[in-house]
Amino acid sequence: MLTARFTAPAVPKTLVHRPELLRRLTAGVQGPLTLINGPAGSGKTVLTAHWAAAGGRAPRPPLWLTVEPGDAPGVFWAYLLEALHRGGVELPAAVGRPTRAEGVTQSFLVRLAAGLAESGSARPVVLVLDQFDTAQPAALTEGLDFVLRHAAGGLRIVLTSRTDSLLPLHRYRAAGEIAEIRHADLRFTHADAEALLSEHRLDISQDGIRLLLQRTEGWAAGVRLCALAMQRSPDPEAFVRQFAADRTTIADYLLKEVLDAQPPATQDLLLRVSVTDRVHPDLADALTGRDDAAPTLARLARDNAFLEQVDASAWYRLHPLFAEVLRAHLRQRHPGLEQQLHGRAARWLAGTGRLNEAVVQGAAAGDWQFAAGRLVDDLAIGRLFTGLEAERLNRAFAPLPADAPGAAPALVGAAARLVVQDLPGYAEAVRRADSHLGPGSGAAARLTRAFLGVLAGRAHADPAATERAAADAERVLEELPPPLVAARPEIRALLLAALGAVRLGAGRLDGAHRVLTAAVDACAEPAAESAAELGTQYPLCDALGSLALAELLGGRLRQAAEHA
């Protein structure tokens, strides 16, 4: 037998002490089953080894057995008996030993359970089964469950695993006989990361530590591997901001421990869905051309394969570092495929009404006609100026070529220039847009042009140009379907807030007050949605600020204070 399987791994010298988790482990072994479950590198074995090395504060020192892939049931039980023997657990000779690798008899399990009940009556046996997640045969887990339930408290088991084992965990939960430490519990906190970096003699700022935790999402191995790399970096603080996951030991770890452990079809699915921030099974099927995504994604989430379900919905998301590594591997394995997948994702997302995601994917595919066209045709141009997704959308359109053909790309390019107050760049882009536009152009494109004219007029402090563009916008709004206009409240809110500010600047207080009040009304929130979600928070604050100034200039101090 391999002696190493009965010995807990050595605790790292740069150990992060986690007293709360150690306390939960100690409390857990007062009952029959403790489960420590998390993905590769989440610190399951290190935590348990640390606890065992300290004696576990259990009735007797914990025993250790590392479970190997491919252990036949008979082999597993032979190793378990040897672990008990090496730990000084005296069992009756009548218990016997397995005689066949393929399995054991029910009578053997009965004798073992009875022996453990007798020998552990005063001091229960605490046994750690490390890595008990390697597709164990059903007969093995059923036998383990039988022994655990019939040992009359004489056996306590601590399981570390990447996946939920085939043990009937629901029964233990219903009986209150299981303690669970999950991935969320194992994630490094800010204090944990700070302690680890200190152990590596790294002096990183609080902002740097927060960024490291953000990128790794508290994944213990990721933080540890980054710390090792930072020791070799001439500027550790800069490393946190700039490191590329696909060019570090993190990539090697994730590829070997996670990707390579999957069947070829699952590897292909993971590579393809890495092009999206989150994935629905139907979207995954569209990216793979198969129809097996639903069970595959569910299994990967259950197996803690760096993929998790999003808020109990049908959607899933990859760990950002894993996604980064997968995308790099996709480019290496299938050159040119990434852009095609972005295009497929864009059309699927657009077909399901997810405009922002569709636009971002279309831009990533370099399909500027599609991406800009959706933003213009859906009256969503205002989302470049306001709302929770404004920064993301502007980042997506940053690579938009200045000479991309068509009215929509030129209009979106002009909007992007206006967002950063690049007025010469805006003027050049809007001239290109005007060369494509005419009386016969669609209402959405003409509204977009007028909308940009209002915002540009404000930026130039040009009341006449602003008024003309605002009048054009009001006329075109009448041509558009009312439900579409109602679904984009930020358009009217931005238009009115800009027009009111320009009138205020021109000293037209009454006209400014009327338009700014209308702007505030346009930002009224439906009960189910917030101003931030609707994209009206910025124009609302803008209009209220201008109203406060208008009231102040009119001598109405109380109203000015209320608006402010």
Image: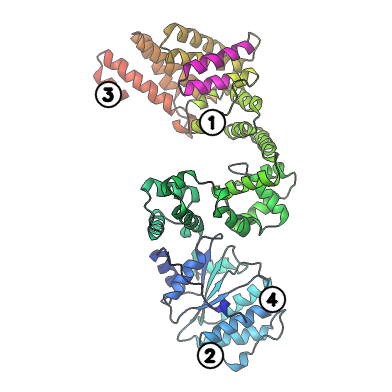
Query: What label does residue 90 carry, if any?
Result: 2
Left/right of residue 89 with respect to residue 262 in the rendered view: left
Q: Position of residue 447 (x, y in %)?
A: 56, 15
Circle 4 crowding by C-alpha within 10 Å: few under 14, some 14–19, many from 20:
some
Q: Residues within 10 Å of mark 3 (few under 14, many from 20)?
A: few
Dividing the picture into quarters, in which one does residue 413 lie?
top right
Q: Which circle marks residue 72 in the picture?
A: 4
Instruction: Kindly report which numbered mark, 1 or 3, lies closer to the viewer in this rendering.
Output: 1
Task: Point out the tag, 4 or 3, that comes first from the N-terminus.
Answer: 4
Measured Cα–Cα span from mark 1 to mark 4? 54 Å
Residue at the right extreme?
Answer: 290
Q: Is residue 255 magenta?
A: no
**Is 160 placed above or below 518 here?**
below
Find disc 3 in the rendering and name its residue. Answer: 561
Mark 1 or mark 2: which comes first in sequence? 2
Highlighted magenta segment, given as a residue range: 411-437
Amino acid type assigned to the residue bearing label 1 in the image: Leu
Q: Which of the 4 quarters of the picture holds residue 162?
A: bottom right
Say which mark, if any, is on residue 393: 1
Q: Residue 168, how many percent across, how many down? A: 60, 68
Image quarter of the C terminus: top left
Residue at 41 percent across and 76 percent down: it is 57
Among the two numbered marks 2 and 4 on one chain, the one whose residue lies closer to the N terminus? 4
Q: Is residue 275 placed above or below 116 in the rendered structure? A: above
Q: In front of the other: label 4 or label 3?
A: 4
